[in-house]
Image (cartoon, coloured by chain):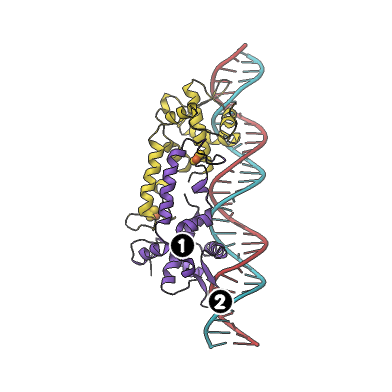
Chain colours: A yellow, B purple, C red, D cyan
Amino acid sequence: MFSRACQYGIRAVIYICGESQKGNKVGAKQISEKTGVPEPFIAKILQDLARKKIIGSTKGPTGGFFVDGRHQELTLKQLVDAIDGEELFTGCSLGLENCSEANPCPLHGEIKQIRLSIVRMLTQKSIKEFAEEVEKGETVLSRMIQT
Amino acid sequence: MFSRACQYGIRAVIYICGESQKGNKVGAKQISEKTGVPEPFIAKILQDLARKKIIGSTKGPTGGFFVDGRHQELTLKQLVDAIDGEELFTGCSLGLENCSEANPCPLHGEIKQIRLSIVRMLTQKSIKEFAEEVEKGETVLSRMIQT
DNA sequence: ATAATAGAGGATAATTTTATCCTTTATGAT
DNA sequence: ATCATAAAGGATAAAATTATCCTCTATTAT
Ligand code: FES
Ligand code: FES
C-alpha cells in the first residue's frame, strides 16, 4: 500500500511532531532510535520533505527537524503525496495507463470507494492528533522497548 | 497497492477465464496482446500460478493456459495471495514488525476497515463474473484498441 | 516417427527501491 | 573567532522488482 520510504516518513514525522509540541527539535539519530527506521535512510527522506517545505529543519547545534505553526494541520495525505506520489489515489489499480470512468478496469468501481476511505484515513486527523495519541500511549511508532 | 506482477496477473487470469468459458486455451503471446502485459513477464507469472495449481496449463500445439472446473469460483484474493503474499492483509501498514491489536500503530484502527473492504472487493465476485463483465464490454483489461 | 508448438525452467539484464557513506555548509555554543 | 554539531548534497552500494532470453521437455497434429 505504502512504500517503505513512506511508512518510515509517516512514523518519523509523527514522532517529530510530538517532540515539536514539547518545543524540541530532533535529529536523525534520535528519530531513528525512537521509530526503528535506519538513520541514513530517514535522513534522506526528511531532507526531501524539508526541501518541499513539508517539515522544517535547521543545521548546527540544537538544530534538527521540527513541525511548527507554519506546517500546522499537516495531514498524512500530504506526506504520502510527497513521498509516494499520487499513483495510489489517481492511477489505475490494475496498472492501465490511466484510470478512466468511461473505460473502467474490472476493479475500478470498487476501488473508488476504497480510495475514498484511504483519503479519509489520511486527512481526517491532523498529524498533531496522531502525535497526541502516541504521547498518550494509545498507539506506537516502533516495536522496540521505549526507554 | 498491488505489485506490477500482481496487476498483470489479475488482468491475465481474467482474460484467460473469459476464453476458457468459450472453451479456448490461450498462449502467453495472445494474453500479452489482449492485456498489454509484456509477454515473457506474464509467462513467468502464469508459470508460477500454474505450479501452484491456481490455473491450468498444457504444453504443445493447442496447449496454453486455462481456468476450468477444477479452479472454479477462483477469486482475486487467491491470486493476490499467490503473487504478492498476505502482507497487504496481515502486515502493519506502517511497516512495524507485526500488526498488533494490543500495540497498534497510528493507522491500525482505520486500516482494519479498509482491509476488510479490499478483501470484500477481491472475494465478492468470482473471476468468472469479472470475465463476464469484460465480455459484455462493461470493463476493459487494456487500453489498446481491441481487434 | 517426425515436426511443430507451447509451457517449464534456468540464467541473465535492466530498473527501481532501499540503504549507506563521505564531504560540504550552515549555525549555535563557547 | 573557534569549535562542535547537525542537516544538505552527492556518490555509491545492496537488494528487490521488473523484464528478457535461451534451452529443455511435453504434447499434439500429421
Ligand atoms: S482503477 Fe482501473 S480504470 Fe480506474
Ligand atoms: S496496521 Fe500497524 S499495527 Fe496494525
Q: Quadrant of residue A31?
A: top right
Going by the picture, which residue comes out furthest to the front? B102
Q: Which mark is residue B60?
A: 2
- Give residue B24's position: percent from left, percent from top: 45, 74
Residue at screen point 41% across, 31% down: A126
Query: Which amino acid does the dot numbered 1 rest on?
Result: Leu
In this view of the protein, which residue sits in the foreground, A127 or B85?
Answer: B85
> Which quarter of the rendered picture does the C terminus of chain A lie within?
top right
Instruction: Tell me which chain the residue with mark 1 is part of.
Output: B
Instruction: Decide: is A58 above or below D19.
Output: above
Q: Badge 2, how many Cα within 10 Å: few under 14, some, many 20+?
A: few
B83, B70: nearer the viewer:
B70
Give the x, y percent position of residue B141.
41, 61
Residue under pointer 1? B74
Q: Is residue D25 above or below residue D10?
A: below
| Foreground residue among C2 and B52 | B52
Q: Position of residue B98 (x, y in %)?
A: 55, 41
User: Could one spot residue B29 in this view of the protein?
Assistant: yes
Q: Which amino acid does label 2 sit on?
A: Gly
